[in-house]
Amino acid sequence: MTYDADNIFARILRGEIPCHRVHEDADTLAFMDIMPQTEGHTLVIPKASAEDIFSAPPAVLAATMQATQRIAAAVRKAFDAPGVMIAQLNGPAAGQTVFHLHFHVIPRYAGKDFRMKSGPMADQATLAAHAARIRAAL
Ligand code: 5GP
């Protein structure tokens, strides 16, 4: 599969579609997932055009994993989460729906399940407040 430059995350990176931004550096962007599986669900993506983990050069992966570690620490602090799940899907058979490499950072709590993918959309004010909480914890 070739990289589709009009996928939703490419459009977010170009500023064509808004997002609730948590952090940005030269190589990566972190923002709130619009259909959070738990409160605080954040996505970390490389700015480079890579469809999945197999097509990302090592330097892109390194930068994205470092950003993911940093964002996960801030999410853990901001949401007082004893656990943090990092998920990354490759290919439709694995459940990937957006074909620009991304890491899900999902706060987890003992005995509390997470919602299935493609659940309800969170309201914009809630996402904005959650992004601000994570930014404050960075
Ligand atoms: P995947 O299923 O590919 O692993 O993850 C794609 C994620 O992108 C899903 O969790 C979905 O909720 C999220 N998503 C889809 N469209 C948008 C959007 O327009 N904005 C944001 N912030 N997240 C999106």
Image (cartoon, rainbow, N blue to C red):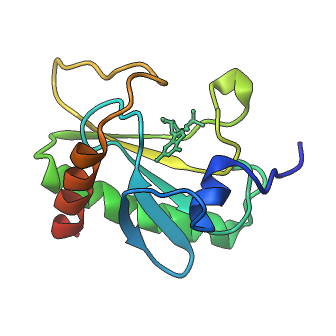
Relative depth, front residue between 117 and 77: 117
As drawn, 68 above or below 104: below
Residue 124 quadrant? top left
Tell me where residue 93 appears, x and y as whole percent.
72, 22
Of residues 121 and 109, the one nearer the viewer is 121
What residue is rendered at 55% in x and 58% in y? 45
Looking at this view, is 28 or 120 the one in front? 120
**Outermost residue to the bottom:** 26
In the rendered image, which quarter contains the C terminus?
bottom left
Q: Is residue 79 left or right of residue 3?
A: left
Counting from the top left corner in percent of width and height, residue 27 is at: 57, 75
Q: Residue 17, relative to residue 60: is it above or below?
A: above
Horizontally, residue 94 falls left or right of residue 67, namely right
Residue 132 percent coordinates (x, y): 21, 62
Q: Residue at x 22, y 51 (%)?
A: 130
Give above or below for 133 relative to 41.
below
* Extreme-left residue of the structure: 80
Q: Give the quarter of the image for residue 37.
A: top left
Across and down, in percent, residue 121 comes to 38, 31
The quarter in which the N terminus is drawn is top right
Q: Which image quarter: residue 35?
A: top left
**Which residue occupies 65% across, 25% down?**
94
Q: Residue furthest right?
A: 2
- Figure check: 131 above or below 60: above
Q: Is residue 9 left or right of residue 80?
A: right
Badge count: 0
Report the front residue among 68 and 130. Answer: 130
Q: Residue at x 72, y 26 (%)?
A: 92
Query: In the picture provided, is 104 more to the left or to the right than 36?
Result: right
